[in-house]
Every structure is written in structure tokens, then in C-alpha cells.
Image (cartoon, helix red, strand yellow):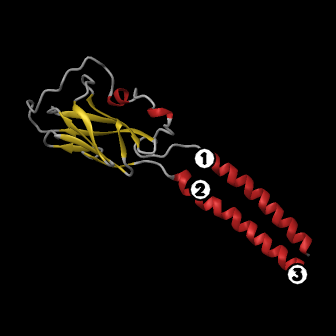
Amino acid sequence: MRGRVASTALALTLAAGVAAPATVLAPVAAAHSVLVSVDPQDGATLETSPDQVTLTFNEEINQMFASVAVTTGGDRANLVVGEPTVEGPVVTVALDDLADGPYTVGYRVTSADGHVVSGSSVFTVQAGETGAGETAIGATGDSAEDQVGDQSDPAGNQTADQTSGEESGGIDPALWVVAGLAVLLIGGAFVLLRRGK
């Protein structure tokens, strides 16, 4: 009887040991930087040209690796003025005066932990006046996403790309380790319970 009780207790301990690492590692594997909001909102139609574009993420962004481009289908020139300003999780860029028409915001940033987030959104300026503003003419023919896509890997620690806040696919290797340990421990618990009988 004592042997059976001891075997049962050991089996429960092993099962708890399986659950503990899975609980600890699951949030780590699922944690990713995401875009929380963009202003102007994706798909918005504006009556006046916006002064800036603001991107807000769920984690702090690395000032050294933040790129944003705003382009129109006409000439593909980047209409951003100056460098992006980063304050914690918020990235802001100033804009030239924009003429009526559709615009694409392309971004590629790196969070403080090295995770890369990239994607795009669109908005339209429809002021109803032909002289709302002249778009700058650039030397390159790259789109907004192309212009921010050439950024180099910061210290080789980029982990994954993400578009419009969607998490990248794949299974974290740590989960495979946990799964293997779980199989071994459950098998051991089963053998101990059989012996206890």
C-alpha cells in the first residue's frame, strides 16, 4: 500500500513538472511586437493633408532601427520629412503637404528586444481642391514598403518579420523540448503507477 501511495505521489510530481515549464515558456513563445494603432487610420479618407503619421506599438522601439516611408502611386517618392522620432513605443514622422490622392505608409521597426515588425497601411487625401499641395519628386522608384525593406539586421538579433501586427508563423524550438520532456515524464509516471499496483 505504501509503495502504491509513493508511486502515485511521484507520478503527480512528475505531471506537475511537465506543466510548469510549459506554463512558463508558452507566453515567451507567443510574445511578439505588434502595431497597436496608426494615425491616420488604415483606410481613412482625410479632408486635409495630415502633418504627420504616428505608429504606436505594444513595446518600446529601437531609435536606431525605425524606418517609415509614405508614398503615392504616382511617383513613389518618400514624402516623409526628416528622420522618425521615437518615444518609447510611439514612432512619429513629419510629412510634406500632400495633394489629393491615395497614400501608402510602409514601416519597418525593431523593438527593444530585437523583434522586427514591418507592414503597411493606406489613407486617402480628398480635399476637393487641386492645389492642396505638390508631392515631392524623388530619385528612386521604390514603394513605401520597398524603401523601408533594405534596413540591415541590428547586431544580428532580428528574430522575425511581421506584417500589420500579424505574428510570424513557426513553432518555438522550446516547445519541442517541453513536449519531449512531457512524453518522457508521463511515460515514467505510468510505469511507476503500474509497479505500485
Above-or-below relation of 187 to 88: below
Marks 3 and 2, how far apart in space?
Answer: 35 Å
Distance between mark 1 and mark 3 Cα atoms:
41 Å
Disc 3 on helix, strand or loop?
Answer: helix
Q: Is residue 146 left or right of residue 77?
A: right
Query: What amino acid is at disc 1?
Result: Asp
The residue identified by callout 2 is 25
Q: Which residue is mark 3?
A: 2
Q: Residue at x 8, y 30 (%)?
A: 131
Kindly identify which numbered label has been placed on residue 172: 1
Relative to residue 36, is residue 47 depicted above or below? Answer: above
Image quadrant in which you'd find residue 7: bottom right
CB within 8 Å, label 1 to label 2:
yes
Secondary element under disc 1, as helix, strand or loop, is: loop
Badge 2 marks a residue whose secondary structure is: helix
Q: How dense is the environment of label 3, judged by Cα within 10 Å: few (below 14), some, or many (20 and up)? A: few
Residue furthest front as drawn = 155
* 45 to the left or right of 181: left
Q: Residues within 10 Å of mark 1 (few under 14, many from 20)?
A: few
Contact (Cβ within 8 Å) of mark 3 with mark 2: no
118 in relation to 142, above or below: below
Give residue 50's position: percent from left, percent from top.
Answer: 17, 41
* Quarter residue 134 falls in: top left
